[in-house]
């Protein structure tokens, strides 16, 4: 989860500063989702927030910094929701909870989905693919320990396949708001839990 924002002089932010930073991150999520990375200029962020560009720069030193903070904010919300669902589910049902909560969160927050995609495409940070598949592989391993092996696929490959399926379902929902992502999540879960052939 993202840490509490700090000014470059490392002093504690005031309540007003934290509220303004939060507003700027939300506005940036909206703009990036609605207009893409290029459409979320500092001027557009300032205009949507009802402040000056200089005021945006007081809180964030650049467009990249505010986009990075907005991306971290969105990821923090996703990780918190998925983590809570997984913790509540228990080891045997954790992979199912992961799939359903990941798809559910992104279905309910389409702007978050677009923000994540835009930040990954246009962001300046390197993304380690293992950061995506390793947690799911760990959940799959714990589920196998609880209920026994379910597939002949190695867990890394199964996690990559499952993550790819989640991504595809979320992308389809962005293209077609009527697409039934809950049913799609159930199909993915059924594939993950399909017993290995005798």
Image (cartoon, rainbow, N blue to C red):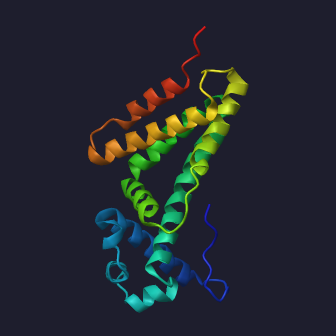
Q: Position of residue 91 (x, y in %)?
A: 68, 32
Report the side of 137 relative to 41 (left or right): right
Report the side of 25 relative to 81 (left or right): left
Quarter of the image with the C terminus in it: top right
Which residue is painted at 65% across and 42% down in the image?
87
Query: Picture quarter containing residue 186?
Result: top left
Q: Nearer the viewer, residue 170 or 197?
A: 197
Which residue is painted at 61% across and 30% down in the image?
93
In the figure, 31 relative to 56: above or below?
A: above
Report the side of 73 relative to 178 (left or right): right
Q: Nearer the viewer, residue 196 or 146?
A: 196
Which residue is painted at 40% across and 49% down in the image?
108
Outermost residue toward the top? 198
Quarter of the image with the N terminus in it: bottom right
In the figure, 1 relative to 64: above or below?
A: above
Outermost residue toward the right? 145
Q: Position of residue 120 (x, y in %)?
A: 46, 60
Tally the marks: 0
Q: Position of residue 56 (x, y in %)?
A: 44, 85
Q: Position of residue 81 (x, y in %)?
A: 55, 50
């Amino acid at each position: 989860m993202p840490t509490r924002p700090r000014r470059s002089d490392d002093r504690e932010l005031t309540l007003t500063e934290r509220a303004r930073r939060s507003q700027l991150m939300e506005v940036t999520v909206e703009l990036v989702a609605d207009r893409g990375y290029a459409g979320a200029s500092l001027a557009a962020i300032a205009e949507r927030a009802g402040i000056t560009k200089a005021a945006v720069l007081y809180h964030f030193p650049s467009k990249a910094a505010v986009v990075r903070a907005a991306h971290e904010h969105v990821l923090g919300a996703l990780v918190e929701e998925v983590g809570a669902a997984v913790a509540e589910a228990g080891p045997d049902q954790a992979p199912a909870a992961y799939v359903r909560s990941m798809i559910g969160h992104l279905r309910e927050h389409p702007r978050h989905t677009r923000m994540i995609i835009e930040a990954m495409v246009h962001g300046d940070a390197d993304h380690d693919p293992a950061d995506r598949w390793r947690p799911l592989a760990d959940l799959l391993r714990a589920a196998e320990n609880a209920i026994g092996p379910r597939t002949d696929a190695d867990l890394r490959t199964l996690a990559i396949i499952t993550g790819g399926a989640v991504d595809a379902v979320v992308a389809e929902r962005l293209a077609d708001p009527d697409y039934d992502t809950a049913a799609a999540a159930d199909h993915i879960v059924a594939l993950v839990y399909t017993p290995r052939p005798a």
